[in-house]
Image (cartoon, rainbow, N blue to C red):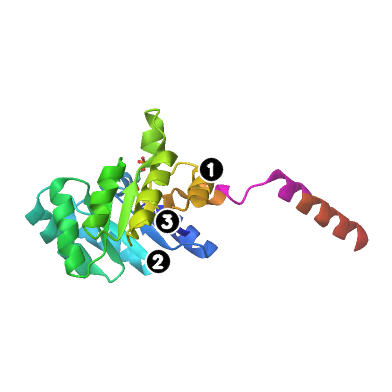
Amino acid sequence: MKFFIDTANLDQIKEAQELGILDGVTTNPSLMAKEGITGKENILKHYVDICNIVEGDVSAEVNAVDFEGMVKEGEELAALHEQIVVKLPMIKDGVKAAKYFADKGIKTNVTLVFSVGQALLAAKAGATYVSPFIGRLDDISADGLSLIEEIRQVYDNYGFDTEILAASVRHTMHIVDCAKIGADVMTGPLSAITGLLKHPLTDAGLAQFIADFEKGNK
Ligand code: G3P
């Protein structure tokens, strides 16, 4: 399972990278705005900064919602760095753009996916990644993890290459459950990733080992 971090915060990206478990980064316009990154030049530079920290794929989202605009913006983003994956919204023109980029060998991430039907269209268009938002489904009392399970089944039925990127991951158990289901990738906040480290028996066991070592080596 690949681990992506879902943030535009460079310190958090560095911290995850230094842990040695990071496979990539996802961003979106809201995450860029949260870091105060505004204006085209600053946004493009920030994507390059992220690419220079991590070794894997970095999703950069288009802001256009029409086919021509997505192609223009996506080509500009893809030209920034070889690690850039063009992130496209799951709308009609987004599907058309995913096919356009697939034909050109440019990686895409189709985002804002909330149904199996949408995921099927993304795979048919040749998307590299499909991003079902599990946390936002949970927020409205729907079952985000069931969606991952259903997409896994459909993709496996037909051998689609599109990777299931479980997005809108909010906590540690989302990651564990996605791993059990067989999501190819998860993207979440640093807190969810580092949450995987925690177990009280690890802390208690380590405290005991340290105490016993110190007793015997006074
Ligand atoms: O990658 C999609 C993700 O950023 C959405 O997360 O927490 O805003 O639902 P969230």
Which of the 4 image quadrants contains residue 114? top left
Q: Residue furthest top?
A: 141
Q: Which residues are magenta?
A: 195-204
Q: CA distance from mark 1 to mark 3?
A: 15 Å
143 lies above or below 122: above
The structure residue drawn at horizontal position 63% and vertical position 47%, both measured from the top left corner, is 198
Q: Let me know if residue 71 is in the magenta part.
A: no
Q: Let me know if residue 196 is in the magenta part.
A: yes
Q: Nearer the viewer, residue 34 or 107?
A: 107
Nearest to N terminus: mark 2 or mark 3 = 2
Q: CA distance from mark 2 to mark 3?
A: 19 Å
Is residue 168 visible in the rendered structure shown here? Answer: no
The structure residue drawn at horizontal position 33% and vertical position 64%, both measured from the top left corner, is 49
Q: Secondary structure at mark 1?
A: helix
Give the prevailing secondary structure in the magenta stretch.
Answer: helix
What residue sits right under mark 3 in the picture? 185
What residue sits right under mark 1 in the picture? 173
- Residue type for callout 2: Ile
Is residue 14 visible in the rendered structure shown here? Answer: yes
Q: Position of residue 8 (x, y in %)?
A: 35, 53
Q: Position of residue 53 (x, y in %)?
A: 40, 66
What residue sits right under mark 2 in the picture? 53
Q: Position of residue 81 (x, y in %)?
A: 26, 70
